[in-house]
Image (cartoon, rainbow, N blue to C red):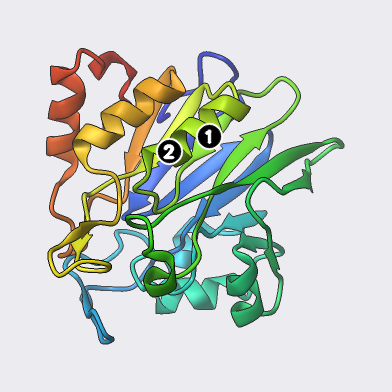
């Protein structure tokens, strides 16, 4: 995804850091979960520590046509600089509850709801919200609402962006509804006690990321959300090794 897709030259994706991925699709510039803060600690019931600051600023990224925000309630998906960035974005697609909190140009989308985003020169791409489960069954009241996204358009590859999802059942639902060609999977194996006294898996671990790629039968997979934060229990190397061991390393976009 650092090079043009084999299905179309109109899809490029680059991980900036954490969950922040710059996507160029059908002539549009899209950004996932903007996080641009320097290293620091975010207080709360479960404090989060950013160990490495963003390598670029919001100004470096420049104007985007839309932000695809999986959720707004956790600083590792929307930090202080990311919130400020949203003020200049013409459209932010996020959860229904998140849009109510954010206001402005934020638009809430329910799982499986489709939104058309105009393309330069005419036409549009379709952004379909998907379910996402940020933990085990029963975790939603604690972790909040989360969504993922599927991008489709005439002459364009089908792209799945998972958001913070830990459920392979969700991935199966996506695979049943869409012929996914390119996948951006948030991983990192975040583990925190949510519904049990022992740590629960809140995002894909390496093993589940491999299985997600297999379920989707995606031709190429970009791994995001595996760096810059202390609460990740696995890094990019762990995930790459798992894909190689499973004989699926050729699908993985190396970065």
* Label at residue 173: 1
Task: Name the residue nearer the viewer: 250 or 111.
Answer: 111
The quarter of the rendered structure image containing the C terminus is top left
Q: Image check: 192 left or right of 182?
A: left
Q: Is residue 245 visible?
A: yes
Residue found 57% across the figure and 15% down from its top: 7
Task: Name the residue nearer the viewer: 99 or 156.
Answer: 99
Q: Is label 2 in a helix, a strand or a loop?
A: helix
Q: Which image quarter: residue 119? A: top right
The picture places residue 179, in percent across and down from the top left corner, at 58, 21
Which residue is disc 2 drawn over? 169
Q: Image check: 71 left or right of 47?
A: right
Residue at mark 1 to residue at mark 2: CA–CA distance: 6 Å
Residue found 74% across the figure and 38% down from its top: 125
In contact (CB < 8 Å): disc 1 and disc 2? yes
The picture places residue 77, in percent across and down from the top left corner, at 40, 64
Q: Is residue 64 visible?
A: no
Position of residue 107 relative to residue 30, above or below, is below
Residue found 20% across the figure and 65% down from its top: 192
* Label at residue 237: none
Q: Is label 1 in a helix, a strand or a loop?
A: helix
Q: Image check: 160 left or right of 78?
A: right
The quarter of the rendered structure image containing the N terminus is top left
The picture places residue 28, in percent across and down from the top left corner, at 67, 43
Residue found 18% across the figure and 57% down from its top: 232
How busy is the neighbourhood of tag 1: few (under 14 within 10 Å), some, or many (20 plus)?
Answer: some
């Amino acid at each position: 995804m650092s090079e043009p897709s084999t299905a179309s030259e109109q899809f490029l994706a680059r991980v900036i850091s954490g969950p922040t991925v710059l996507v160029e699709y059908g002539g549009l510039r899209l950004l996932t979960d903007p996080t641009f803060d320097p290293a620091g600690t975010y207080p709360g019931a479960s404090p989060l520590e950013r160990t490495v600051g963003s390598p670029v600023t919001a100004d470096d990224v420049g104007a985007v046509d839309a932000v695809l925000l999986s959720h707004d309630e956790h600083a590792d998906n929307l930090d202080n600089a990311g919130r400020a960035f949203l003020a200049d974005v013409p459209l932010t697609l996020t959860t229904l509850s998140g849009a109510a909190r954010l206001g402005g140009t934020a638009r809430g989308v329910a799982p499986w709801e489709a939104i058309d985003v105009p393309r330069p020169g005419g036409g549009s791409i379709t952004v379909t919200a998907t379910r996402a489960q940020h933990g085990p069954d029963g975790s939603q009241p604690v972790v909040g609402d989360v969504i993922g996204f599927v991008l489709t358009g005439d002459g364009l590859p089908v792209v799945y962006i998972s958001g913070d999802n830990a459920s392979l059942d969700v991935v199966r639902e996506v695979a049943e509804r869409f012929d996914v060609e390119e996948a951006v999977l948030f991983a990192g194996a975040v583990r925190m006690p949510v519904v049990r006294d022992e740590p629960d898996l809140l995002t894909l671990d390496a093993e589940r990321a491999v299985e997600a790629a297999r379920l989707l039968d995606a031709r190429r997979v970009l791994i995001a959300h595996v760096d810059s934060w202390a609460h990740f229990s696995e890094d990019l190397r762990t995930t790459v090794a798992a894909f190689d061991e499973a004989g699926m390393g050729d699908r993985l976009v190396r970065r």
